[in-house]
Image: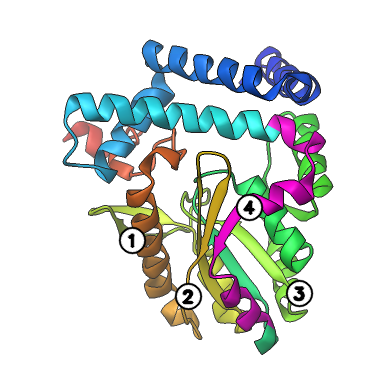
């Protein structure tokens, strides 16, 4: 990405946070929905990849049904950004009150045991608003943020999430983030990780919607190391609010159990995503079959 592109990207986010909160809600929502529809019609790379991903989620869908699902998914993604830009100016207590939650007792049980909990979520619904609810329910929690470029944009996202009550740790190539997460769990606190798309080279092979892919080992590894409860969590939109489902604990007590526990997370995610496919915001390649082989590779030559 060029310096100009990075600068324009940062300007766009800064403008969004500054201006969108000032728009009347109905007007702003309509503008973002229009933008989503326009992007869908243009059919850029992200939209095409979203379509390929959703075709795995709903394999029985015909072309017309898949077209409509992609349109709704893009509107859902636009809603996420509209809410994210407005969230700093929203009443967080009122926001938390509009979240319907199932399974909060699983958090209570985990904290009662004294080893903390690892909550793993997919890229679905509005995970920032899920965090607002969690901060209001259980106090602050710790999460990890991918390093963005430029650094000023990364700092802006960190400041945004810290303003919502999150403790944010940068995702780096060293073990510093893992050490802090381990410490928080040993303090009987909550760690929240997005757990569907692997951003490292050490993902765990799983079957997801019938096809092999990789998912992060981090959630299950943290639980195995500390004895923390591993709680898969789903998040999706409702017509005028949000819904969260905190699933029962997946037990993992040894490093050897991490692959099976990660597969169990994948199975829970798949159930929630299949029930709410339009709210899974996956516009990037997710399955290895969609990632082009490097030039000169055996796959390319075969």
Q: Which residue is mark 2?
A: 248
For marks 3 and 1, the one nearer the N-term is: 3
Q: Is residue 180 left or right of residue 193?
A: right
> Which residue is identified by label 3?
183
Q: Residues within 10 Å of mark 4 (few under 14, many from 20)?
A: many
* Image-quadrant location for residue 204: bottom left
Residue 166 — which label?
none
Q: Which residues are magenta?
A: 85-111
Instruction: Give the left or right position of residue 265, taking residue 18 as reference.
Output: left
Q: Position of residue 276 (x, y in %)?
A: 39, 46
Secondary structure type for disc 3: helix
Q: Quadrant of the N terminus?
A: top right
Q: Does residue 172 show up? A: no
Q: Secondary structure at mark 2?
A: loop
Between marks 1 and 4, how big is the CA–CA gap? 26 Å
Q: Which mark is first along the chain, 2 or 3?
A: 3
Task: State the residue position of label 1.
Answer: 206
Residue mark closest to the camera, 1 vs 2: 2
Callout 4 secondary element:
helix
């Amino acid at each position: 990405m060029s310096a100009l592109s990075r600068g324009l990207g940062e300007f766009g986010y800064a403008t969004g946070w500054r201006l969108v909160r000032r728009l009347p809600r109905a007007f702003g929502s309509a503008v973002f929905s229009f933008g989503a529809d326009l992007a869908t019609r243009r059919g850029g790379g992200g939209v095409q990849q979203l379509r390929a991903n959703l075709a795995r989620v709903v394999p029985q869908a015909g072309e017309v049904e898949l077209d409509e699902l992609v349109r709704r998914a893009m509107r859902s993604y636009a809603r996420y950004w509209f809410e994210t830009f407005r969230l700093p100016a929203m009443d967080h207590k009122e926001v938390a009150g509009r979240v319907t939650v199932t399974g909060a007792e699983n958090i209570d049980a985990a904290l009662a045991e004294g080893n903390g909990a690892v909550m793993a979520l997919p890229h679905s619904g509005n995970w920032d608003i899920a965090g607002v609810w969690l901060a209001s329910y259980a106090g602050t929690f710790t999460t990890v943020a991918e390093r963005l470029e430029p650094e000023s944009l990364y700092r802006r996202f960190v400041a945004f999430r810290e303003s919502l009550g999150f403790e944010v740790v940068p995702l780096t190539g060293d073990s510093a983030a893992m050490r802090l997460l381990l410490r928080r769990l040993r303090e009987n606190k909550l760690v929240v990780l997005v757990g569907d798309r692997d951003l490292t080279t050490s993902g765990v092979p799983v079957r997801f919607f019938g096809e092999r892919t990789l998912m992060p080992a981090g959630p299950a590894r943290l639980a195995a190391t500390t004895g923390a409860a591993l709680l898969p969590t789903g998040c999706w939109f409702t017509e005028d609010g949000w819904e969260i489902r905190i699933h029962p604990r997946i037990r993992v007590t040894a490093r050897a159990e991490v692959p099976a526990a990660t597969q169990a997370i994948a199975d829970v995610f798949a159930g929630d995503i299949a029930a709410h496919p339009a709210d899974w915001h996956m516009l990037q390649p997710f399955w290895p079959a969609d990632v082009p082989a490097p030039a000169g590779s055996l796959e390319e030559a075969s």
